[in-house]
Amino acid sequence: MRDNRKIIKFAPVNQKFIKIHTMKKITIIALCVFTAAFAASAQTAPKFGHINMQEVVFLMDEMDSARVELEKFSADMQSTYNAMVEELNTKIATYEQMSANWTPSVLSTKQQEIQDLQARLQQYEQNAQRDITALQNQLMAPISQKATEAVNKVGKAKGLIYIFDLSSGAVTYFDAAQSLDLTADVKAELGISPDKQLPQAQSQPQM
């Protein structure tokens, strides 16, 4: 019996087409992987925040109490200083008016009194400045710690890796569009009213 089946010959495979087609597929896959990786990296990109710590601290209720206590302490020190200055001025005026009528021994005594009072006044001024600074540091320590803890809590909740303090003077440039302003969140964390304004600067009396 004769076999009527035809033998079908396939055209030779175009190797160039396979290579080009394969390269296109690889390129498309690579592009998809890159796009997905870029999107993932954009979502997990480092996040930064910024805040003016000085402003926040000045608005805290604890700062109001500390300011009142420090102002009272400074006023008391100033009052004592003024009394000593008045006493010194009185002694100097008396000396100038009466020195011509005093005996040498009285004159020497009065001169020594003035010198001693001047020395006491200078020493008191130095001690007063030191005590005011010490009290200020004592009052500010817990306030600063509380503010820092609030910033850390807000920063951690928002997944930030770095927070810039604009009041430190160390930040010369930052892009506000790529950094979160934490001021409102930290104020809320500390219970500071959004409407509260910074106190007016008051000049301290000079000793």
Image: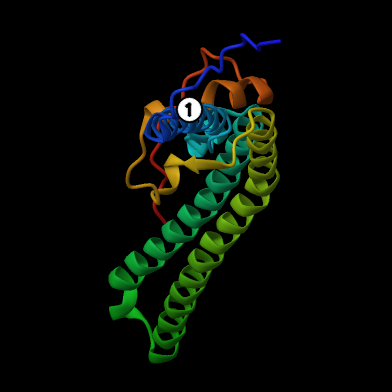
Tell me residue 116's x, y (percent). 49, 78
- Labels in figure, total: 1
Colouring: rainbow
Left or right for 85, reference 159: left
Quadrant where the C terminus is found in the figure: bottom left
Looking at the picture, tell me which residue is in the foreground, 57 or 51: 51
Q: Position of residue 41 (x, y in %)?
A: 54, 34
Quadrant housing residue 144: top right
Residue at 37%, 34% (x, y): give it.
16
Task: Name the residue tied to disc 1.
Answer: 25
The x, y position of residue 125, in whole percent, is 48, 64
Q: Position of residue 46 (x, y in %)?
A: 54, 38
Residue at the spot 48% in from the left edge and 42% down from the top edge: 165
Residue drawn at (60%, 30%) of the image:
64
Q: Quadrant of residue 3?
A: top right
Give above or below for 71 relative to 95.
Answer: above
Q: In this rendering, is residue 189 above or below 86?
A: above
Left or right of 61 on screen, residue 20 = left
**Residue lying at the far bottom of the rendered structure:** 104
Mark 1 surroundings: few (<14), some (14-19) or many (≥20) residues within 10 A:
few
Q: Secondary structure at mark 1?
A: helix
Left or right? Give the position of 162 relative to 62: left
* Amino acid of disc 1: Lys
Q: Residue furthest front?
A: 1
Q: Residue at x 57, y 55 (%)?
A: 132
Of the 4 image quadrants, the one containing the N terminus is top right
